[in-house]
């Protein structure tokens, strides 16, 4: 409910913690506000009315502040007192809230009282406009203001007297920044004031199309007094403003601590309200390699469905080490139709981990997460043509970062690796990537794919777990159930999705015919045979990765193959024979 709270929440989401103790302190604060809804609502009302303390202090520190920023500091300190009174209702506040209480007590209450005495009720936006110092705060300022205001009354009485003396009822005394104060009459009365005896009093200054302007010696004297009084009053106000700013800057460290406490309090109460309203639970974040989510939900998609009155189908995910072995996180290979929810499932688990380590409750019925050191995501399609990178090149670059950097503590989500190139090229890359994740990175990972042939790898890779998204076929259509279950899919239902998208019926019919022909080749059987034939992936050494140098026999064979006898002259053939003999080992 505050700008500072919004900024702090964005910072925490952008930089989650990897210290389980620090995460626990944040979660303790949220849990306290989950348990006490009355205190939570009272604090949110106080915070909602509080000004943005950090922004006001920053403007004043940079010399760009105004009177309203000083009032913001005053009101923020008063709001801190109100929040402290509300927080005093907690019997044993958690460590995070105790730190907030200590920070809210730091700003000097004398500073707030000084600002309350100095500042008027109605404040201008800019200090140069003046009028922001309360009457009675500074005696010299009150004297200058009285002189300025009294002089203006003198001008008003002078205008009435000049009108009577000249007999011109429409005579006005006006002011602008060029001429200062001047007497103005309409053009038809201008000659009258320029004729004796009135011309002895009224001195002509300017003739316009419809008006004539004059001045008098008396008016010039009054103008000097008014200008001096106004300038002196504004100068005194600016001096008072600088003094108050100096007081604020001197207390900047305490005020910044209070501003951060306000933001932390806003984040904790907001996340507590979200947890209560949307049934979030406290995650168990520890130093293990566990990753067990029960009833997990996507925090954004769930809100969109709720607005449409539809439920979100929750799903479990367990990437914890098999049998508790350290450094052996599971890899889930997720297959299933288009539009069934594979990408949503991948992202929701990554977001649950991010929220948990940012110090928030999570959308699940239970969650245990071992600290994730880095979260890697390879999702979607994008190009970088300005740097000469195609869509597939960008995909491979991002995949390379993951395979080269992910550790056993990392969490990786990969969606459709290898789809941007030829089918067997892509299948080969995805196959090798899974083996590398399993044997080299040994990280916790979710790998979504339409290459159903990859499911055969689960027979060889002990930590590879096949999962699929459940669907039902009904009268030629596909019903998406959005449930993630053990097993594998054998179809992607892409043609049905194309039909839903509105492709012409002729295209759909032709696609079904071509698909039937292709499926008759039974590529799945080929993949199973390939999985049986290939040895398990092993991390290659540098020597193994480099091709072996050709032997002398290989060189001799290549030299013979390079000969073309029918095209050679007798002399060329004799020279070639001598060259071959020279290659024989001695």
Image (cartoon, rainbow, N blue to C red):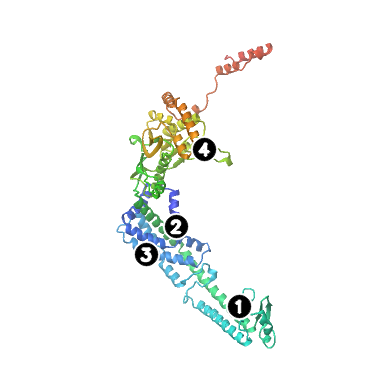
Callout 2: helix, strand or loop? Answer: helix
Image-quadrant location for residue 350: top left
Whichever of labels 2 and 3 marks the residue nearer the N terminus, that label is: 2
In the rendered image, the vertical position of residue 475 relative to residue 81, given as above or below = above
Q: Position of residue 129 (x, y in %)?
A: 54, 70
Whichever of labels 3 and 1 marks the residue nearer the N terminus, that label is: 3
Between the residue at mark 2 and the residue at mark 1, the CA separation in whole angstroms equals 48 Å
Instruction: Judge by depth and name the residue closer to the eye, 273 or 255.
Output: 273
Kindly identify the residue that appears in the image at 45 percent across and 52 percent down: 10
Q: Residue furthest bottom?
A: 197
Whichever of labels 2 and 1 marks the residue nearer the N terminus, that label is: 2
Q: Which mark is residue 397?
A: 4
Between the residue at mark 3 and the residue at mark 4, the CA separation in whole angstroms equals 54 Å
Between the residue at mark 4 and the residue at mark 1, the CA separation in whole angstroms equals 74 Å
In the rendered image, the vertical position of residue 557 relative to residue 510, given as above or below = above
Is residue 540 visible in the rendered structure shown here?
A: no
| Viewport quadrant of the C terminus | top right
The residue identified by callout 1 is: 174
In the rendered image, the vertical position of residue 252 relative to residue 346, given as above or below = below
Whichever of labels 4 and 1 marks the residue nearer the N terminus, that label is: 1
Callout 4: helix, strand or loop? Answer: helix
Instruction: Judge by depth and name the residue closer to the eye, 266 or 215.
Output: 215
Q: Which mark is residue 82?
A: 3
The residue identified by callout 2 is: 4
């Amino acid at each position: 409910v505050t700008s500072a709270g919004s900024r702090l929440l964005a910072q925490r989401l952008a930089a989650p913690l990897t210290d389980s103790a620090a995460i626990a302190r944040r979660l303790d604060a949220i849990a306290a506000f989950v348990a006490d809804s009355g205190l939570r609502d009272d604090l949110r009302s106080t915070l909602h009315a509080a000004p943005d303390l950090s922004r006001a202090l920053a403007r004043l520190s940079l010399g760009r502040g105004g009177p309203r920023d000083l009032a913001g500091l005053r009101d923020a300190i008063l709001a801190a007192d109100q929040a402290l009174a509300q927080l005093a209702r907690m019997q044993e506040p958690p460590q995070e809230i105790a730190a907030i209480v200590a920070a809210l007590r730091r700003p000097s209450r004398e500073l707030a009282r000084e600002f309350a005495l100095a500042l008027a009720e109605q404040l201008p936006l800019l200090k140069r406009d003046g009028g922001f110092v309360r009457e009675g705060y500074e005696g010299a300022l009150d004297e200058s203001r009285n002189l300025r205001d009294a002089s203006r009354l003198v001008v008003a009485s002078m205008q009435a007297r000049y009108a009577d003396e000249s007999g011109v009822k429409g005579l006005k005394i006006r002011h602008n920044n060029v001429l200062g104060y001047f007497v103005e009459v309409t053009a038809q009365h201008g000659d009258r004031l320029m004729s004796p005896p009135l011309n002895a009093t009224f001195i002509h200054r300017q003739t316009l199309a419809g008006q004539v302007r004059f001045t008098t010696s008396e008016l010039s004297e009054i103008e000097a007094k008014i200008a001096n009084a106004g300038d002196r009053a504004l100068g005194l106000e600016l001096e008072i403003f600088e003094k108050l700013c100096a007081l604020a800057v001197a207390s900047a460290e305490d005020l910044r601590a209070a501003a951060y406490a306000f933001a932390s309090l806003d984040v904790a109460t907001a996340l507590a309200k979200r947890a209560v309203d949307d049934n979030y639970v406290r995650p168990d974040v520890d130093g293990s390699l566990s990753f067990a989510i029960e009833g997990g939900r996507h925090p954004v998609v769930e809100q969109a469905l709720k607005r449409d009155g539809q439920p979100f189908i929750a799903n479990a995910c367990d990437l914890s080490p098999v049998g508790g072995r350290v450094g052996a996180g599971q890899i889930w290979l997720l297959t299933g139709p288009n539009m069934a929810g594979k990408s949503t499932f991948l992202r929701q688990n990554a977001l649950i981990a991010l929220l948990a380590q940012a110090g928030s409750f999570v959308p699940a019925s239970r969650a245990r997460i071992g600290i994730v050191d880095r979260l890697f995501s390879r999702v979607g399609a994008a190009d970088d043509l300005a740097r000469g990178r195609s869509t597939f090149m960008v995909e491979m670059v991002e995949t390379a970062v993951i395979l080269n950097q992910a550790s056993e503590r990392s969490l990786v989500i990969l969606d459709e690796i290898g789809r941007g190139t030829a089918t067997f090229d892509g299948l080969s890359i995805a196959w090798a990537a899974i083996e590398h994740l399993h044997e080299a990175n040994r990280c916790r990972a979710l790998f979504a794919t339409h290459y159903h042939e990859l499911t055969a790898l689960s027979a060889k890779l002990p930590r590879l777990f096949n999962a699929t998204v459940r669907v039902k076929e009904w009268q030629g259509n596909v019903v998406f159930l959005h449930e993630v279950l053990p097993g594998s899919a054998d179809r992607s239902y892409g043609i049905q999705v194309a039909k839903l998208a509105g492709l012409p019926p002729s295209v759909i019919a032709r696609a079904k015919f071509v698909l039937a022909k292709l499926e008759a080749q039974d590529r799945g059987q080929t993949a199973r045979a390939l999985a049986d034939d290939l040895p398990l992936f092993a991390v290659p050494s540098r020597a193994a990765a480099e091709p072996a140098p050709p032997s002398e026999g290989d060189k001799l064979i290549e030299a013979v193959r390079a000969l073309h006898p029918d095209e050679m002259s007798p002399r060329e053939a004799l020279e070639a024979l001598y060259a071959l003999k020279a290659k024989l080992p001695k």
